[in-house]
Image: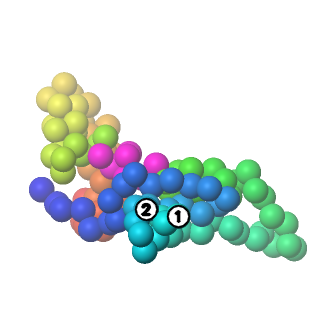
């Protein structure tokens, strides 16, 4: 079982900035990511940038769904029902999120 090293969720997003953990030191939350991206020729795609912020903000929740309490029970259940490819995909995604070999 791998212990998460990322900033604990929940993460939120607003104005293309992803934040976590409001505190006295960080009343708006600690900044995790800034999804402002200017494309070639000065083009700014706010829709794509906002979608990136939404996806990043959901990352801790998605990881928790795939490996509740750090337990690979979802992929084990899928394997027991013959969904090997799907379980492999889950394990690979969790390993990628945790920075560990699949």
Above or below residue 88? Residue 83 is: above
Is residue 18 or residue 46 the one in the foreground?
18
Identify the residue shown where x is 70% and y is 69%: 37
Magenta span: 58-64
User: Which quarter shows the C terminus?
Assistant: bottom left
- For label 1, the SS is loop
**Disc count in the image?**
2
Residue topped by disc 2 = 22
What is the x, y in percent for residue 80?
A: 14, 29
Q: Main secondary structure of the magenta part?
A: helix
User: Which quarter shows the N terminus?
Assistant: bottom left
Res 92 visible: no
Residue topped by disc 1 = 28
Asked if residue 18 lies left or right of residue 68, the reply is: right
Identify the residue shown where x is 65% and y is 60%: 16
Identify the residue shown where x is 43% and y is 62%: 22
Asked if residue 72 lies left or right of residue 9, the reply is: left
Identify the residue shown where x is 76% and y is 71%: 38
Q: Which residue is at the far top? A: 81
Q: CA distance from mark 2 to mark 1?
A: 6 Å
Above or below residue 22? Residue 38 is: below
- For label 2, the SS is loop
What is the x, y in percent for residue 11?
A: 45, 55
Does the magenta run of residues contain 42?
no
């Amino acid at each position: 079982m791998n212990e998460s090293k990322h900033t604990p969720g929940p993460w939120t997003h607003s104005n293309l900035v992803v934040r976590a953990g409001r505190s006295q030191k960080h009343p708006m939350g600690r900044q995790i990511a800034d999804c402002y991206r200017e494309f070639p020729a000065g083009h700014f795609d706010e829709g794509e940038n906002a979608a990136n912020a939404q996806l990043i903000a959901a990352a801790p929740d998605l990881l928790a769904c795939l490996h509740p309490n750090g337990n690979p029970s979802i992929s084990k259940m899928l394997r027991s029902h013959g969904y090997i490819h799907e379980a492999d995909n889950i394990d690979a995604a969790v390993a990628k999120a945790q920075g560990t070999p699949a």
